[in-house]
C-alpha cells in the first residue's frame, strides 16, 4: 500500500497527548498513532452502518407477534449465551 504525506494542525494539548502515547511504548511515532485512530474510526463507522441497516430491516419487518421472552431466548441461542 502506498503512503501519502499529509500535513495536519493540532493543539498543544493534542500534541502532548500523542507524545505521551508514543512515550508509553505503544506507538513508534506520530504517524503510527494517527493511523491507528483512523483504523478505529473506520471500524466504528462500519459498526454504526451495520446497526443502522439492522434497525431499518427491523422497522420494515413490522410488529412481531412473539413475546419478549421468546425473542430474548432466541437471541441468546443465536449468540451462544447460556439460557
Image: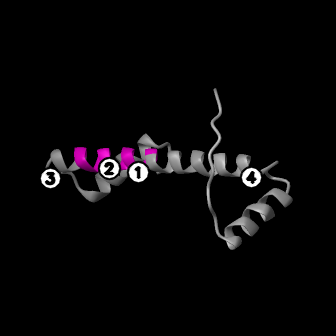
Please report whichever mark, 4 or 1, sits nearer to the chain's N-terminal start.
Answer: 4
**What is the CA distance from the residue labelled 2 to the residue labelled 3?**
18 Å
Q: Which mark is residue 63?
A: 3
Q: Which mark is residue 48?
A: 1
* Image vertical order of residue 63 relative to residue 16, above or below: above
Please state the total of marks drawn on the protein image: 4
Q: Which residues are magenta?
A: 46-57
Nearer to us in this view, 37 or 50: 37
Residue found 30% across the figure and 44% down from its top = 53
Residue corresponding to mark 4: 30
Q: Nearer the viewer, mark 2 or mark 3?
A: 2
**What is the CA distance from the residue labelled 4 to the residue labelled 2?**
33 Å
Other residues around mark 4 within 10 Å, as few (<14) / some (14–19) / many (≥20): some
Q: Position of residue 79 (x, y in %)?
A: 46, 43
State left or right for residue 77 relative to residue 34.
Answer: left
Q: Position of residue 10 (x, y in %)?
A: 64, 64
Q: Position of residue 15 (x, y in %)?
A: 72, 65
Q: Nearer the viewer, mark 4 or mark 2?
A: 4
Labelled pair 2, 1 in contact (Cβ < 8 Å): yes
Q: Is residue 12 magenta?
A: no
Nearer to us in this view, 59 or 68: 59
Q: Which mark is residue 52?
A: 2
Coloured how? Answer: one colour
Please report whichever mark, 2 or 3, sits nearer to the chain's N-terminal start.
Answer: 2
Instruction: Name the quadrant containing residue 22.
Output: bottom right
Amino acid at each position: 500500500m502506498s503512503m501519502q504525506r499529509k500535513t495536519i494542525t493540532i493543539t498543544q494539548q493534542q500534541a502532548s497527548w500523542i507524545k505521551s502515547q508514543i512515550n508509553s511504548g505503544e506507538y513508534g511515532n506520530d504517524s503510527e498513532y494517527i493511523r491507528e485512530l483512523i483504523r478505529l474510526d473506520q471500524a466504528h463507522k462500519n459498526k454504526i452502518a451495520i446497526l443502522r441497516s439492522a434497525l431499518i430491516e427491523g422497522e420494515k419487518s413490522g410488529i412481531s407477534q412473539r413475546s419478549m421472552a421468546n425473542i430474548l431466548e432466541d437471541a441468546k441461542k443465536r449468540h451462544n449465551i447460556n439460557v
